[in-house]
Amino acid sequence: MEISLMKELVFGHKNPDTDAIVAAKAFSYLENKLGADTEAVALGEPNEETKFVLDHFDEPAPRVISNAKDEVEAVMLVDHNEAQQSVDDIDQVQVTHVVDHHRIANFETAAPLFYHAEPLGCCSTIIYKLFKQNEVEVPAKLAGLMLSAIVSDTLLFKSPTTTPQDEKAVKELAKIAGVDYETYGLDMLKAGTNLGSKTEEELITSDAKSFEMGGKTVRIDQVNTVDLDEVFAREDALRAAIEKQNQEKGYDLFLLMVTNILNSDTRLLVIGEPQEAVSKAFDVKIVDNKVDLPGVVSRKKQVVPPLEKAF
Amino acid sequence: MEISLMKELVFGHKNPDTDAIVAAKAFSYLENKLGADTEAVALGEPNEETKFVLDHFDEPAPRVISNAKDEVEAVMLVDHNEAQQSVDDIDQVQVTHVVDHHRIANFETAAPLFYHAEPLGCCSTIIYKLFKQNEVEVPAKLAGLMLSAIVSDTLLFKSPTTTPQDEKAVKELAKIAGVDYETYGLDMLKAGTNLGSKTEEELITSDAKSFEMGGKTVRIDQVNTVDLDEVFAREDALRAAIEKQNQEKGYDLFLLMVTNILNSDTRLLVIGEPQEAVSKAFDVKIVDNKVDLPGVVSRKKQVVPPLEKAF
């Protein structure tokens, strides 16, 4: 493939969720309207929820890449910045733009860049604000995709990461898209909890992210469900799959967050060491590698910061 | 001093230049208008140029701090992000906001934050855009300070870091401030080149920044002048002062950029190792620790990136 000197790829994090896929499409659309030459791609296949969204709005899934430097010299990141969550050869291309709503870590550039982060519930909310600032209209289909991403990241405004700006964006985008966001949103979230069809390997991989904390590699995955017991009926097989992955991939500590999206509680399965970091982070006792965290639904806001502090 | 749980300090980098001082004042003013409780402070005394600016607009110099955590739990950074350019205890406070126009490096947070960077010539240009986005009026005096910062960072639009947005901002701010920016700007730049009154120690310190590159600590200082020969008449004393500082502070490599602001050329004095990194970065031969770099005036855009690449 020829390397383009002008074209840039836009993508979200590995194990893409709906926001990672949609934010890339939305930011690519905006940048192209502003004169850039970009293509939205993804670092993995869409998950069940995202497939439901793409089907609903009749939008194709983005092309999946595993390498950037063979195609382009520069890239734009959405919904992430940490190198281990990005394309494998991220250190060999220039990052010219980042739009994100996460902490900043393990990220470095040689030159100045455009970096726009805000502590909002969803990256697509920030991109919606950028559309407004630049006075670019959001097409109806893209509005539907963007509101899906915000509903997904905020669990229909139940997550504590939700801000008034996220709610406002969903309501405005719903008008543009002509969508009843409450009915549609719940259908979409339920589509993402169709766990019966997934292997244990898929369950512990599909929304997992890696973090470097105190010299350890911490892997945190989140599975949304409407029935905790259904997931923990498979606990033995899940433990075995996690132990295998810890060994093969060199993760020191694996946290599987199983989150009930109806009542906003999480049961944590903790495999690996140091377990004390988890006890300390949440001031809880871990019994048989498990602990209930009532009211915890956000990895970014309620799990990573206290864990980081405990390390 | 009591630690405030609400109030935040806003500051620019160590060895503050006009933009570091002014951007802190401007962003603090904006954030307070938006409901925050902030105070603009500085990590050092104003330099000659900044003194001229503050005198001209009858604005007091900001309070100088050497520590943040004794006063506040959270801070906002302007015009920098790298830890070694920030307050010494930056790792012990939360960074909630960054507005900057530099590369991102050696910067990490535990939680999501507001981070707004653009590759523009001056941080104050970005802050001016934020005033507009938030529909907050810029008072006449602050407009004068902000246009001074932009003229300073862009050397009256001669620096290659200058963008059309910087020029537009200066022209709009000049109208608000009622200032002839060209006449005033040249007077201001000349005030900053009053080198005769400075010791060698002051010359190699006042605008110096540290960078980590390939495991080495690289110190880069810039001195603006209207007469290169006047500065290099003091070369022996400058060399001695740099060698002393390299030893005392542990700098591996020291680059003194002596920049003629009238014709936009730089003569580089290179003390320490590896000298080859500098030869390689600029594809030049260093003779007797010196090399001329015609057309080079920007540390950020023309010196740091090629040097980083060479390391």
Image (cartoon, coloured by chain):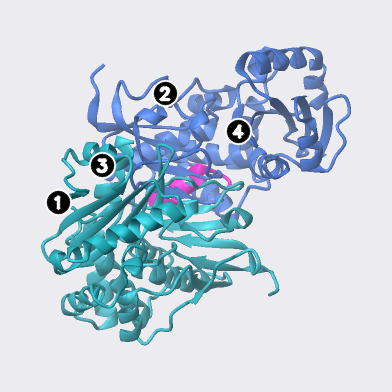
Chain colours: A cyan, B blue
Q: Which residues are magenta?
A: B120-131
Position of A24 relative to B91 (above/below): below
CA distance separating discs 2 and 4: 31 Å
Amino acid at circle 4: Phe
* Residue type, numbered disc 2: Pro
Q: Chain under label 4? A: B
Disc 2: CA contacts within 10 A as few (<14), some (14-19) or many (>=20): few
- Judge if badges 4 and 3 mark residues of a common chain: no
Q: Secondary structure at mark 2?
A: loop
Q: Nearer the viewer, mark 2 or mark 4?
A: 4
Residue that appears at 26% across and 35% down: B37
Mark 4 crowd level (few <14, some 14–19, many ≥20, 10 Å Cα): many
Where on the picture, by quarter, is residue A173?
A: bottom left
Q: Which residue is mark 4?
A: B211
Residue designated by label 2:
B60
Distance from Cα at disc 1 to Cα at disc 4 = 45 Å
Mark 2 vs mark 3, foreground winner is 3
Outermost residue toward the bottom in this view: A58
Q: Which residue is mark 1?
A: A292
Name the chief secondary structure element in magenta.
Answer: helix
Q: Rounded to the nearest whole Å, what is the CA distance between mark 2 and mark 3? A: 49 Å
Q: Residues within 10 Å of mark 3 (few under 14, many from 20)?
A: many
Residue B256 x/y as whole percent: 72, 27
The residue closer to the viewer here, A8 or A243, is A243
**C-alpha distance separating marks 1 and 2:** 55 Å
Queried whether the magenta region covers residue B113, the answer comes back as no
Q: Residue at x 48, y 53 (%)?
A: A84
Closer to us: B149 or B58: B149
